Image: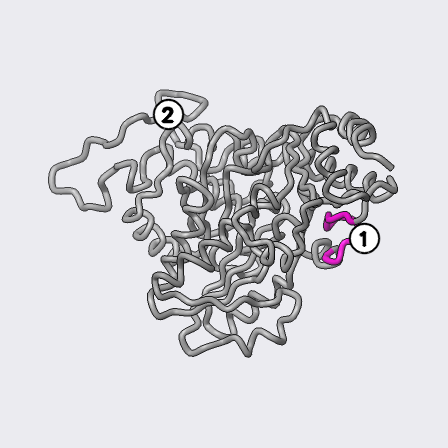
């Protein structure tokens, strides 16, 4: 269904839905078939096969996601890391060089720092707050620039406008991981990014019950990415695609609550006298607040803080809270808490974590859609003055 002129809320529900609906089903059925009947002699691209990412479940997701991101095309993958690795391997080859933001999600950082060099792809790390320094990192074989909309776990927002401008001036492919912002809060393609990546495991699905990824962007690049994805085999299975499709329909209403709850809890923490540092771009004291306010329509439910008293107080807090679940990942309807030094960034060396500002006392919170008053009361009893 065409939803070009409709709002985000309407696109979440109606974009990409099949017309006519299969057997009149209001919810898109699960097509639990690895392969589909075809006419003798049809072209390879006309074959329907799960690994080729072109079943009815895939097609509906691709169209809905492209509509939400305002991009020419989109793909789903088996995980967020499948999206990231496939996208990078589609725009880079042995002998190429690219620029990457120095503070990245731990899995991405390890892939870029450890795996890509084994395949002859080199990286230079750039300071997202110092665009003037990027020119010196350029080489004749530089092909791309990779950034994140908001960093994990400190919620930093680099100069994204400069990244797009720099990419255009130097004929680079620009890639951005927009997992934390989602298209509800930010549409990178409208700023000029070429490829937008998501771990759909998080906010896009929103229910902590699947692992999936998204790659959206220019149709010519998506065609290249699809070729790579089909060979690497990182396709999303039909049942996960069904759950993802269902989760996307409530993205707008969920993000409204995540945004509101995240801001309210961050403000309470900021005024509680219980924290040494608070990281939430929606509050004025955050170093990236002005950029976030300019770029985004909301700040998500992601925040991090360091309690007064250090690592022991952080450990005790996580044991005392009652509503949040102690678990990695993020973006579900339930509030989750974790210490990144021991989960998302455990694969980094202590020196690498220190360089990224990730201490043993840092607590990351994925604020859910519960009553924020109940969450604040729980934090109050668990966090000492």
Quadrant (top left, top right, bottom left, bottom right) of the C terminus: top right
Instruction: Name above or below for residue 97 compared with residue 33.
Output: below
The structure residue drawn at horizontal position 67% and vertical position 41%, both measured from the top left corner, is 364
Q: In the depicted view, which residue is nearer to us: 42 or 383?
A: 383
User: What secondary structure is found at the residue carrying circle 1?
Assistant: loop
Mark 1 or mark 2, earlier in chain = 2
Q: Residues within 10 Å of mark 2 (few under 14, many from 20)?
A: some
Instruction: Name above or below for residue 384 compared with residue 94.
Output: above
The structure residue drawn at horizontal position 83% and vertical position 44%, both measured from the top left corner, is 270
**Is 93 left or right of 378, judged from the image as shown?**
left
- State the extent of the magenta-drawn residues as a range: 277-288
Instruction: Name above or below for residue 357 compared with residue 338.
Output: below
Where is residue 213? Give x, y as percent. 45, 42
**Is 312 left or right of 13, judged from the image as shown?**
right
Q: According to the image, label 2 marks what residue?
A: 30
The structure residue drawn at horizontal position 53% and vertical position 44%, both measured from the top left corner, is 68
- Check contact, mark 1 vs mark 2: CB within 8 A: no
């Amino acid at each position: 269904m065409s939803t070009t002129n409709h709002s985000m809320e309407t696109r979440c529900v109606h974009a990409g839905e099949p017309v006519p609906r299969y057997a009149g089903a209001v919810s898109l059925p699960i097509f639990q078939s690895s392969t589909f009947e075809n006419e003798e002699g049809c072209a390879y691209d006309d074959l329907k096969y799960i690994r080729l990412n072109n079943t009815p479940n895939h097609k509906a997701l691709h169209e809905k996601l492209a509509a939400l991101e305002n991009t020419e095309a989109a793909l789903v993958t088996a995980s967020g890391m499948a999206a990231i690795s496939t996208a990078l391997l589609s725009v880079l080859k042995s002998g190429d060089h690219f620029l990457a933001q120095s503070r990245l999600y731990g899995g991405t950082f390890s892939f870029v720092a450890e795996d890509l060099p084994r395949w002859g792809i080199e990286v230079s790390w750039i300071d997202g707050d110092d665009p003037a320094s990027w020119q010196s990192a350029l080489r004749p074989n530089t092909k791309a620039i990779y950034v994140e909309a908001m960093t994990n776990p400190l919620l930093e927002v680099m100069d994204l406008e400069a990244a797009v401008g720099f990419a255009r001036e130097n004929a680079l492919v620009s890639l951005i991981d927009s997992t934390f912002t989602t298209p509800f809060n930010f549409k990178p393609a409208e700023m000029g990014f070429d490829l937008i990546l998501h771990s759909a495991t998080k906010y896009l699905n929103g229910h902590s019950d699947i692992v999936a990824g998204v790659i959206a962007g220019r149709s010519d690049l998506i065609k290249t990415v699809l070729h790579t994805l089909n060979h690497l085999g990182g396709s999303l299975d039909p049942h996960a695609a069904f759950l993802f499709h269902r989760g996307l329909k409530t993205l707008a209403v969920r993000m409204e609550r995540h945004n509101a709850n995240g801001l309210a809890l961050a403000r309470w923490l900021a005024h509680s006298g219980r924290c040494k540092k608070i990281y939430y771009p929606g509050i004025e004291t955050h170093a990236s607040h002005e950029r976030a306010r300019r770029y985004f329509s909301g700040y998500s439910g992601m925040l991090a803080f360091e309690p007064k008293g250090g690592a022991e107080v952080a450990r005790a807090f996580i044991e005392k809270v009652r509503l949040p679940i102690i678990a990695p990942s993020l973006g579900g309807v339930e509030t989750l808490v974790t210490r990144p030094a021991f989960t998302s960034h455990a694969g980094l060396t202590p020196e690498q974590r220190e360089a990224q500002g990730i201490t043993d006392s840092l607590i990351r919170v994925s604020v859910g859609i519960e009553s924020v008053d109940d969450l604040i009361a729980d934090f109050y009893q668990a966090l000492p003055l």
